[in-house]
Image: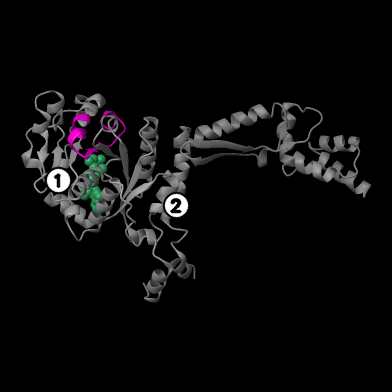
């Protein structure tokens, strides 16, 4: 069956699906994989700007589905990676323009000569989510350490299981270590306790994510970015590599805490 | 001092993070079985209304809780202490009996009664669970000792 289809979803909006999709696409390409990322958020096209490819768009997903363009024509090659492509969402159509079956057909073609097809799902549990879920071999659920985001993640996890696409893995995005240490934020362990789903990544809150979206150069391409490193680790875990979780100082060891205490911090 | 211990041994137990976790647990319990808190209370009242048609229960010690291991394993766990009773009471006495005997469910009563009591005494004791029976029961015991 060739390549693997990975769907990035969340339930709640604005938790970081598009950011995650862009960064995973780039990280996987950086690892030498052949990758296509698909923006399934029809009507709210975003992935193109996050990846800095907005001015290259001619055709989009709906053009392909409705036969106005060949698949190849809608695949925009990344500036930096030979084997990374974006299929943008249509901006002026709605989600009903594409069906889950269309998505399966499309991704089946893409699988033939790519290692990974990553789908950026829209928020919500309606058609757009169904479109993104149907072709998935693996589902990544993005959430923030926050009550409403985790609640919506739970709902979406239930739907993913009901559709036989489970269990899925979790990306906990925008974790603030300092706040967790003060007891003022849910920790990754808390989220795990509640959702009982494997965690594939913990991404720290990182200002460089904003600068990255300003410039259209995802954080994974920024050597110093902690969020970028965390996304790269997720990409490696997707490929099956066993990567230890990086020290987000979320749960520092006893001596570290002792030092910090003696330091008066 | 607590803050010292917290700094040394991990993150604080209090704080809004803990509150967030508790609130999430609560919300998800109801989300996952699609039964909002108010409906659950309603169901509890309905369950009890059926039970009191048959036995006298110790209303104040009733516990009906929703327990959840994970998304797919929820169960209702009920502890409904039954007050020992020989003559089926009229509906009014059911309600009345709780007020006066809330601390005496059947199992405990049985424990204190068993030793050396005749079947008749036993029956009397059980009957004593309504209203002024409590006083009679205590007198009874004093007589025996
Ligand atoms: N780790 C992070 N640190 C800081 N900011 C972040 C992080 N992840 C995401 N953001 C910011 O959060 C916002 C929402 O991110 P993004 O657009 O990826 O979410 P989304 O889930 O795709 O939203 P939507 O549901 O609208 O599609 C953006 O402004 C982004 O820059
Ligand atoms: Mg998005």
Task: Name the foreground residue: A250 vs A23.
Answer: A23
| Parent chain of label 2 | B
- Examine the image and state in which quarter residue B27 appears: top left
- How would you rate the neighbour count of disc 2 (Cα within 10 Å): few for under 14, some for 14-19, many for 20 or more? some
Q: Position of residue B132 (x, y in %)?
A: 81, 39
Return the residue at label 2. Answer: B19
Q: In this rendering, would B74 be left or right of A94? A: right
Measured from the top left, where is residue B95 in percent x and y? 70, 33
Q: Give the range drawn in magenta.
A: A108-129
**Where does the image place residue B57, in percent across and percent down from the top left?**
70, 35
Left or right relative to A11: residue A214: left
Q: Are marks 1 and 2 in contact (CB under 8 Å)?
A: no
Local secondary structure at mark 2: helix
- For the N terminus of chain A, the image quarter is top left
* Residue A8 position in % (x across, y down): 27, 40
- Locate residue A5: give its quadrant: top left
Quadrant in the picture for residue B28:
top left
Secondary structure of the residue carrying numbered label 1: loop
Q: Is residue A113 magenta?
A: yes
Q: In this view, does A255 lie above or below A17?
A: below
Which residue occupies 16% across, 49% down?
A213
| Residue A8 showing in the rendered view | yes
Q: How many labels does the image show?
A: 2
- The chain to which mark 1 is attached is A
Residue A51, numbered circle: 1
Using the image, determine if residue B32 lies above or below residue A245: above
> Distance of mark 1 from mark 2, alpha carbons?
38 Å
């Amino acid at each position: 069956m060739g390549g693997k289809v990975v769907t990035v979803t969340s339930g709640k909006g604005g938790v970081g699906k598009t950011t995650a999709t862009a960064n995973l696409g780039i990280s996987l390409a950086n690892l030498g994989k052949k990758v296509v990322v698909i923006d399934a958020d029809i009507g709210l096209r975003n992935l193109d700007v996050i990846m800095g490819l907005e001015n290259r768009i001619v055709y989009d997903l709906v053009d392909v589905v409705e036969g106005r363009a060949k698949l190849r024509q809608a695949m925009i090659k990344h500036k930096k990676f030979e084997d990374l492509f974006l299929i943008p969402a249509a901006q002026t159509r709605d989600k009903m323009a594409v069906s889950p079956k269309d998505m399966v057909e499309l991704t089946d073609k893409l699988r033939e000569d790519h290692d990974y097809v990553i789908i950026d799902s829209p928020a919500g549990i309606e058609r757009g989510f169904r479109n993104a879920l149907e072709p998935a071999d693996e589902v990544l659920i993005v959430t923030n350490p926050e009550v409403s985001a985790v609640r919506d993640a739970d709902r979406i996890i239930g739907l993913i299981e009901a559709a036989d696409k489970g269990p899925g893995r979790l990306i906990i995005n925008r974790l603030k270590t300092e706040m967790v240490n003060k007891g003022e934020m849910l920790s990754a362990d808390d989220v795990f306790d509640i959702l009982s789903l494997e965690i594939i990544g913990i991404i720290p809150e990182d200002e460089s994510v904003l600068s990255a979206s300003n410039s259209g150069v995802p954080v994974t391409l920024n050597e110093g970015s902690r969020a970028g490193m965390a996304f790269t680790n997720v990409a490696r875990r997707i490929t099956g590599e066993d990567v230890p979780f990086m020290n987000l100082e979320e749960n520092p060891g006893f001596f570290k805490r002792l030092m910090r205490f003696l330091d008066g911090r | 001092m607590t803050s010292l211990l917290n700094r040394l041994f991990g993150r604080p137990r209090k704080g809004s993070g803990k509150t967030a976790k508790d609130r999430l647990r609560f919300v998800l319990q109801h989300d996952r079985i699609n039964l909002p808190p108010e409906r659950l209370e309603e169901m509890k009242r309905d369950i009890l209304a059926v039970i009191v048609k048959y036995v006298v229960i110790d209303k104040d010690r009733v516990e009906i809780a929703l327990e959840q291991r994970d998304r797919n394993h929820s169960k209702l766990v009920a502890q409904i202490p039954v007050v020992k009773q020989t003559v089926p009471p009229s509906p009014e006495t059911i309600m009345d009996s709780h007020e006066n005997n809330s601390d005496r469910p059947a199992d405990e009563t049985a424990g204190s009664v068993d030793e050396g009591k005749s079947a008749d005494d036993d029956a009397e004791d059980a009957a004593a669970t309504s209203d002024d029976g409590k006083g009679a029961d205590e007198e009874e015991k004093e007589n025996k000792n």
